[in-house]
Image (cartoon, rainbow, N blue to C red):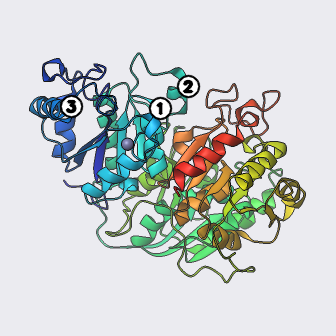
């Protein structure tokens, strides 16, 4: 049966040398073309799934005169003979000295291929064997999957948003992710009232948006249970009819003790919703089961959640998701397991409601960048002195820089902005920040809520990403991004709230010159 709901991808873009065929340096000879094992069968599976295919390849041998365009076309004809047809070939003929916009890691080839295939980069996935491929994909807003070879450097593997063992493995992942967000058995008729839950911070609530929209498309009414730190984000989400704000002590990072009376009041409040079912969204390190128990006590007859722990009779739909799936897709896959899909025409991207509350401050006029130095979790914040150097470097490169932060971050933003920016710390609520980010050419930020706010607005992000959690899961979703910071630092995958490594090396080592270069890659001209 054909799955329902919009597909995750329209097209797969493939690097050539080392990904489709053996890397023979500057090859102009069709006789030397050797496909990598399983490539033909893997590509045919993508073709059979209705995905369009393009090759995106740097061929600096043209600029260097190592082979002619005619030689290259003979090589490509041989590749098509062996691997089947491609819908487009996007080729950069330049070398590094040309400063072109197409040579990977620049995103030009991804834009070209997506355009030629009649789609957008955010609806493409790029498979390649080196860091340049991943950087080009991210800078265009496409998904990247690295298929390392023995020459791929360890830091390129550490930085990649996703890694597969080879091309057939990458194809398995692409098809699996697409199947996961679309119900095999769609619902007959709409659900009544559905209670959806997503605790934790603004960013957590924002990345759950696509999953909540899928539920809303198949329900009469959606009631969202969130925590105090996610409330402002919940108010920005489309598809939410009512919000219940309640802290859940088993989710919060610095939780209050469990108060039996408070739990009884919460259970009564949940019962008063009269929900026909509930969908409990969580992060990969959170358990839905304590809330599922309260929902059962509140009389909710059908409960769906992701749980690796055995749920007994607490869940009706127990869904499981492998590590590394982007959080928005993780949420969509839970909605799909519960029978809900995004409606036709609603893309799997982050979105905000069209009728945002009126802003407390006007959006600044003219061109500007935003630097947001704070983070909801200290281990994910770039040190203030380094943020100040970044502001100074961007200002020196001719940018107008606005520095944003919450009411509790005024001291931080004042210090960072003093280096050459304008301090807007504490002047906006989350909706106001959304207005500012909507007009920004680019946001420089850590892995925290405003990164996801920018993604929901289509504003490119220079992500100063502490590797305490997987980049592939928490990267700004489907928006042009450059990842900076040491992906292989000792704090990797610790989920630490405070950096466990002296000197906070994953972010304190970010070179301001690389931030300037990242902005140039994302915002040409
Ligand atoms: Zn080029």
Mark 1–mark 2 contact, CB under 8 Å?
A: yes
Q: What x and y, as percent, mark residue 395?
A: 73, 55
Mark 1–mark 3 contact, CB under 8 Å?
A: no
Disc 2 is placed on an element classified as helix
- The 10 Å Cα crowd at callout 1, few under 14, some 14 to 19, many 20 or more, is many
Q: Which residue is mark 1?
A: 131
Cα separation, mark 2 vs mark 3, equals: 34 Å
* Between 288 and 374, the one nearer to me in the picture: 374
Give residue 68's mark: 3
Disc 1 is placed on an element classified as helix
Q: Is residue 352 in sight in this rendering?
A: yes
Which residue is farthest right? 411
- The 10 Å Cα crowd at callout 2, few under 14, some 14 to 19, many 20 or more, is few
Give residue 155's mark: 2
Q: Residue sitting at 60 percent across and 79 percent down?
A: 356
Disc 3 is placed on an element classified as loop
Image quarter for ligand 1: top left
Q: Residue sitting at 87 percent across and 59 percent down?
A: 414
Q: What x and y, as percent, mark residue 363?
A: 68, 77
- The 10 Å Cα crowd at callout 3, few under 14, some 14 to 19, many 20 or more, is some
Comes first in the chain, label 1 or label 2: 1
């Amino acid at each position: 049966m054909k799955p329902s709901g919009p597909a995750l991808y329209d097209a797969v873009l493939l690097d050539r040398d080392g990904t489709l065929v053996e890397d023979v340096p500057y090859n102009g000879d069709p006789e030397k073309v050797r496909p990598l094992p399983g490539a033909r069968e893997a590509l045919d599976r993508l073709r059979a799934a209705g995905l369009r295919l393009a090759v995106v390849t740097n061929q600096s041998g043209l600029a260097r005169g190592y082979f002619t365009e005619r030689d290259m076309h003979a090589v490509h004809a041989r590749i098509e003979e062996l691997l089947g047809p491609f819908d487009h070939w996007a080729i950069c003929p330049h070398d590094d000295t040309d400063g072109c916009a197409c040579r990977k890691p620049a995103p030009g080839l991804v834009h070209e291929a997506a355009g030629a295939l009649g789609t957008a980069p955010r609806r493409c996935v790029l498979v390649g064997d080196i860091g340049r491929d991943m950087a080009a994909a991210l800078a265009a807003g496409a998904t990247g999957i690295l298929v390392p070879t023995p020459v791929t450097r360890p830091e390129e593997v550490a930085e990649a948003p996703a890694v597969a063992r080879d091309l057939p493995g990458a194809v398995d992942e692409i098809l699996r992710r697409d199947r996961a967000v679309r119900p095999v058995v769609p619902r007959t008729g709409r659900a009544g009232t559905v209670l959806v839950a997503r605790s934790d911070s603004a960013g957590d609530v924002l990345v759950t948006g696509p999953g909540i929209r899928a539920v809303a498309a198949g329900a009469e009414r959606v009631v969202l249970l969130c925590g105090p730190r996610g409330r402002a984000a919940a108010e920005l989400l489309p598809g939410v009819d009512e919000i219940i704000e309640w802290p859940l002590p088993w989710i919060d990072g610095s939780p209050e003790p469990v108060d039996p009376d408070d739990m009884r009041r919460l259970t009564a409040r949940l019962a008063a919703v009269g929900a026909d079912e509930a969908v409990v969204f969580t992060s990969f390190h959170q358990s839905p089961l304590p809330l599922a128990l309260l929902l059962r006590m509140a009389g909710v007859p059908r409960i769906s959640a992701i749980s690796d722990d055995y749920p007994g009779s607490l869940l009706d739909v127990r869904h499981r998701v492998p590590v590394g799936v982007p959080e928005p897709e993780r949420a969509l896959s839970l909605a799909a397991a519960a029978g809900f899909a995004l409606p036709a025409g609603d893309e799997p991207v982050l979105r905000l409601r069209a009728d945002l509350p009126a802003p407390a401050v006007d959006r600044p006029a003219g061109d500007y960048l935003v630097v947001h130095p704070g983070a909801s979790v200290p281990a994910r914040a770039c040190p203030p002195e380094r943020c100040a150097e970044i502001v100074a470097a961007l200002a020196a490169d001719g940018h107008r820089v606005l520095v944003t932060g919450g009411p509790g971050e005024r001291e931080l933003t004042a210090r960072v902005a003093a280096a050459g920016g304008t301090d807007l710390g504490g002047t906006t609520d989350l909706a106001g920040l959304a207005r500012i980010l909507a007009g920004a050419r680019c946001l420089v930020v850590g892995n925290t809520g405003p990164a996801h706010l920018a993604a929901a607005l289509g504003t490119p992000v220079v992500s100063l990403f502490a590797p305490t959690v997987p980049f592939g899961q928490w990267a700004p979703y489907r928006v042009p991004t450059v990842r900076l910071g040491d992906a292989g630092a000792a704090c990797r995958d610790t989920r630490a709230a405070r950096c466990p490594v002296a000197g906070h090396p994953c972010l304190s080592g970010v070179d301001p010159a690389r931030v300037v270069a990242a902005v140039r890659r994302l915002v040409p001209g």
